[in-house]
Image (cartoon, rainbow, N blue to C red):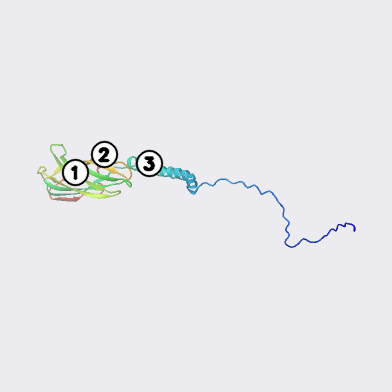
C-alpha cells in the first residue's frame, strides 16, 4: 500500500487565538515634584509682588502725609470774638481760633496773651492752659485780664505767643512757634462788645 499524504483544510477551532507580538510604545515620563516643592516654586513671585505693592502703598502714604502736613499746613485763623470789661482793671477777652487744615490737628501749649499800653509803658501777661484742636475745628478761648491801670479809657495792644504742634497721621510731630498780633484795642469801663468776625489778627508760624 502506498503512503498517501492527506492535507486537511478547515476552520480553526473557536478557542484558537491568533496573536501578534509588537514592541511596546515608548512613553517619556518625568519625575513629579512633591506638593510642598510645587507650592514653593510659585510662592517667591507672589511674595515679591506683594512686597512691592506694600512698599508703594507705604511710600504713597508717607508722601501724602508730608505734603499735606508740612507743605500745605496753614496757621490757625485767630480773631477777637468779644471783649467784656466789668471795670477798667478787670475784663475778659474771648478769642476765636480756627484750624483751617483738613489733614492736620493742632496742639497748643505755653500760651501767653499779653496786654500792653499803646506806648508800652506797662504790660500784663496772661497764661492760658494748653488744649488740642481737631482738623477743621474751631474753639473759643477766654482770657481773664487783671491789674490794668485804672482809667476811663485805655488803648491796649493785644498779642499772643504759643508753641503749637501740627500732627497728621503716620507722620512725625512738627513743632512751631506761633506769634499773634491783634493790634490796638480800645477798652472802656462797663464795656461788653462783640467785636465781629472781621477783626482778624495777624498770625505767623516760625
The answer to whether residue 63 is seen in the rendering is yes
Q: Residues within 10 Å of mark 3 (few under 14, many from 20)?
A: few
Pointer 2 or 1: first along the chain? 2
Whole-percent x, y for residue 165 in the image: 26, 42
The answer to whether residue 88 is seen in the rendering is no
Q: Is residue 173 above or below residue 5?
A: above
Pointer 3 or 2: first along the chain? 3
Mark 1 falls on what kind of element? strand
Foreground label between 3 and 2: 3
Whole-percent x, y for residue 124 in the image: 14, 41
Whole-percent x, y for residue 82 in the image: 20, 49
Mark 2 falls on what kind of element? strand
Foreground label between 1 and 3: 3
Foreground label between 2 and 1: 2
Q: Which mark is residue 63?
A: 3
46 with respect to 136 (left or right): right
Image quarter (top left, top right, bottom left or bottom right) of the N terminus = bottom right
Read off the residue under disc 1: 185
67 with respect to 119 (left or right): right
Read off the residue under disc 2: 176
Query: Could you tell me which residue is drawn at 38 percent across and 43 percent down?
Result: 58
169 with respect to 152 (left or right): right
CA gap between label 2 and label 1 equals: 27 Å
113 with respect to 9 (left or right): left
Q: Is residue 135 above or below residue 1?
A: above
Q: Residues within 10 Å of mark 1 (few under 14, many from 20)?
A: some
Query: Could you tell me which residue is drawn at 26 percent across and 39 percent down?
Result: 176
Mark 3 falls on what kind of element? helix
In front of the other: 61 or 46: 46
Q: Residues within 10 Å of mark 2 (few under 14, many from 20)?
A: some
Amino acid at each position: 500500500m502506498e503512503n498517501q499524504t492527506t492535507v486537511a483544510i478547515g476552520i480553526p477551532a473557536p478557542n484558537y487565538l491568533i496573536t501578534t507580538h509588537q514592541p511596546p510604545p515608548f512613553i517619556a515620563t518625568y519625575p513629579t515634584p512633591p506638593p510642598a516643592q510645587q507650592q514653593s516654586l510659585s510662592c517667591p513671585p507672589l511674595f515679591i509682588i506683594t512686597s512691592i505693592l506694600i512698599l508703594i502703598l507705604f511710600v504713597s502714604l508717607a508722601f501724602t502725609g508730608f505734603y499735606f502736613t508740612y507743605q500745605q499746613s496753614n496757621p490757625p485763623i485767630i480773631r477777637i470774638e468779644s471783649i467784656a470789661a466789668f471795670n477798667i482793671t478787670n475784663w475778659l477777652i474771648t478769642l476765636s481760633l480756627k484750624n483751617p487744615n483738613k489733614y492736620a490737628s493742632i496742639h497748643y501749649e505755653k500760651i501767653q496773651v499779653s496786654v500792653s499800653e499803646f506806648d508800652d509803658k506797662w504790660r500784663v501777661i496772661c497764661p492760658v492752659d494748653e488744649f488740642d484742636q481737631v482738623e477743621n475745628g474751631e474753639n473759643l478761648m477766654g482770657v481773664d485780664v487783671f491789674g490794668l491801670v485804672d482809667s476811663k479809657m485805655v488803648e491796649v495792644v493785644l498779642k499772643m505767643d504759643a508753641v503749637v504742634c501740627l500732627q497728621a497721621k503716620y507722620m512725625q510731630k512738627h513743632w512751631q512757634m506761633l506769634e499773634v498780633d491783634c493790634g490796638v484795642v480800645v477798652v472802656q469801663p462797663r464795656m461788653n462788645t462783640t467785636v465781629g468776625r472781621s477783626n482778624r489778627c495777624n498770625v505767623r508760624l516760625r
